[in-house]
Image: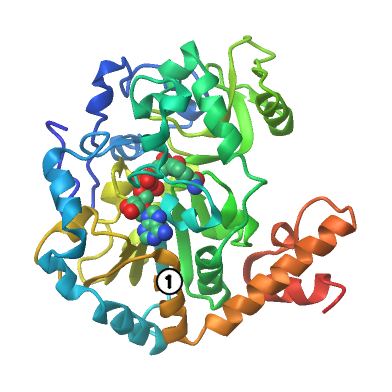
Amino acid sequence: MSGSKSKEDDGSSRPAVARITRSSRSTESRDSGPGQYGKQRKKQLHSALTQDLSQMSVSGQGSPTPSEGKQLGQRHDGPALGKCGGGLASVARRMKIGRCRNIVVVAGAGISTPSGIPDFRTPGTGLYANLEAFNIPYPEAIFNVDYFSNDPQPFFSLAKVLYPGSHRPNYIHFFIRMLHHKGLLLRMYTQNIDGLEKLCGIPDDKLVEGHGSFATASCHLCYTPYPSEEAKRAIMSGDIPTCTFCAATVKPDVVFFGEDLPQKYFLHTKDFPKADLLIIMGTSLQIEPFASLVNTVRATVPRLLLNRHPVGPFQRIPLRRGDHMELGDLENTVRKFAEMLGWHDDIVELMKSQEQQQCIATVGGRSGTCSEESDSETDSKCSASSCPSN
Ligand code: CNA
């Protein structure tokens, strides 16, 4: 972390890059490793700032330092909670009177825990607390490209759990889709790789999967594309997919530590200055560049944190003017928020119709889902027109 700006440093238009201090044990560095060979490196036509932002790393220690742990430990009794509660209502009011029409959502693994996918850092249930099974020396090794080069098995074991297919989007995902449906979502930036945002019908042009996804696969060394279904089949059956060009191991295009983020991520340079509300949900804000990204909205723009405990700039007391947080179980919080907005019934309806669509698609033997067919502003129309029972 030395030489980099603290992740809690606020109001900057240029997010700092923090490095994986814990994985300094590894050999990875921004200027070495597979990134320099492949397609993503070639695509780096942007400025030094762009390059800085394009690296994923852990902000601070890989796991909280004792002092961070202490800060996180303030979750239920710190003075910061003084801001908790009224904030949700005040943001809802603002939305209702039309002052938030360009909402940016930044999300993390916490939005998918109600779907049954463990996050990283929740004590007890998080993947980091259950890594013995993967036989790795430290948690981040599982997403370390050098480690993967030597031994892909730990990541492939995890991939079996995370591969999209066995989990369903939950109320939180549909709340975000509803933001889009109401014409209020400027963009969703997710760190998740589970594909549930797409599955619930958030269209591609509204979604930035900042840490990549399982939807495509390529060689981890030369980046030659590889059919994703074949990669999945191999991984699920315990085989190792290998590159047809250089014979190195193929991996799904999820972003590992030290790798470049997808080009689409750079939409943030336009989106964040334009945002009139930032909603941060279900993330520990421990990973750069997302951790710093939340500091790049204009200083007057309200930021709402929905999480189990304060994270990032929300650990600072007093909170920045315009910052609000609602702490507790995310699904309950989002439900409360939806009720304040008068959206709850619509969301339930949307969820039901989506389930029905998928049911029909499955029974009819069609591949794909209504959500994959739905598009842009037409998602509700899609539900109505492509579902025979409607
Ligand atoms: P994280 O570091 O595990 O943080 C998750 C945060 O969400 C924590 O602050 C939790 O307290 C909070 N949280 C979890 N469940 C709830 C809940 N039900 N209600 C309220 N708060 C909750 O995960 P981040 O997303 O911050 O870290 C980014 C990593 C995690 C990315 O690289 C992801 O690829 C990676 N990841 C993704 C998935 C997924 O795709 N579903 C799963 C596990 C890890």
Q: Residue at x 20, y 52 (%)?
A: 72
Q: Return the residue nearer the eye: 82 or 76.
A: 76
Residue 218 image-quadrant placement: top right
**Residue 378 vs residue 333: left or right?**
right
Question: Horizontal and vertical percent for residue 374?
Answer: 70, 64
Q: Return the residue nearer the eye: 256 or 49.
A: 256
Q: Residue at x 66, y 21 (%)?
A: 238
Amino acid at pointer 1: Asn
Question: Horizontal and vertical percent for residue 375?
Answer: 68, 64
**Residue 354 vs residue 169: left or right?**
right
Query: From what the image shows, is residue 312 above or below residue 183?
Result: above
Q: Return the residue nearer the eye: 44 or 79.
A: 79
Query: From what the image shows, is residue 115 above or below residue 232?
Result: below
Q: Residue at x 55, y 56 (%)?
A: 115
| Mark 1, other Cα within 10 Å: few <14 / some 14–19 / many ≥20 | few
Query: From what the image shows, is residue 346 above or below residue 1?
Result: below
Disc 1 target residue: 332
